[in-house]
Amino acid sequence: MTLQEKKISRKLAPQSSARMVETIYGCKWSLTVYQLLKAGVNRPGEMVRQVEGLSTKVLNQCLKRNVEFGILDKHVFNELPPRVEYKVTPFGEKFLAILDQLEALQNDLDAL
């Protein structure tokens, strides 16, 4: 078989999405943040109060990374004292659905 006869090229892993998944799973608080958002807790101060061991500094790093990836949207209100809320973007909804599928796959593997 010559090179010209080959029809399928080598498939490579998607770099950006694989990096996102690795980064999110690498941050031990991201999945907790998603749980909080799903429960309606969308303000950073309330998130810190709800989760034992979560510091403001680490939470802000986690939230910033999620905003950079486009998973979360940050809304800053023009008021005093300052108020910030986070919500999941439409892209984030797709991403979280993939994370749910990965969790289901892990549960299947654990059951074997």
Image (cartoon, grey):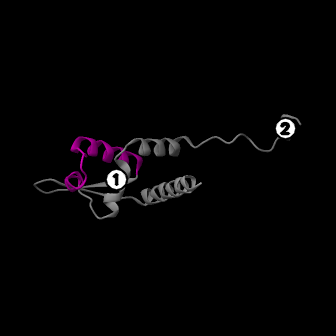
Tell which of 108 and 19 is nearer to you: 108
Q: What predominant SS class does the magenta segment belong to?
A: helix
Q: Which mark is residue 4?
A: 2
First-in-chain label (1 vs 2): 2
Quarter holding residue 25: top left
Amino acid type for the residue under numbered disc 1:
Thr
Q: Residue furthest top?
A: 2
Instruction: Give the residue drawn at x 82%, y 41%.
Output: 6
Q: Which residue is mark 1?
A: 32
What residue is shown at x 52% (from left), y 58% (from top)? 104
**Magenta stretch in the rendered image:** 44-70
Q: Is residue 108 rendered magenta in the image?
A: no
Residue 93: x %, y % from top left: 44, 60
Up/down of 17 relative to 76, above or below: above
Q: Residue farthest to the right?
A: 1
- Judged from the image, the secondary structure of the residue bearing numbered disc 1 is helix
The amino acid at mark 2 is Gln
Residue reaching furthest to the left: 80
The local crowd at label 2, few if under 14, some if 14 to 19, many if 20 or more residues have their Cα within 10 Å, is few
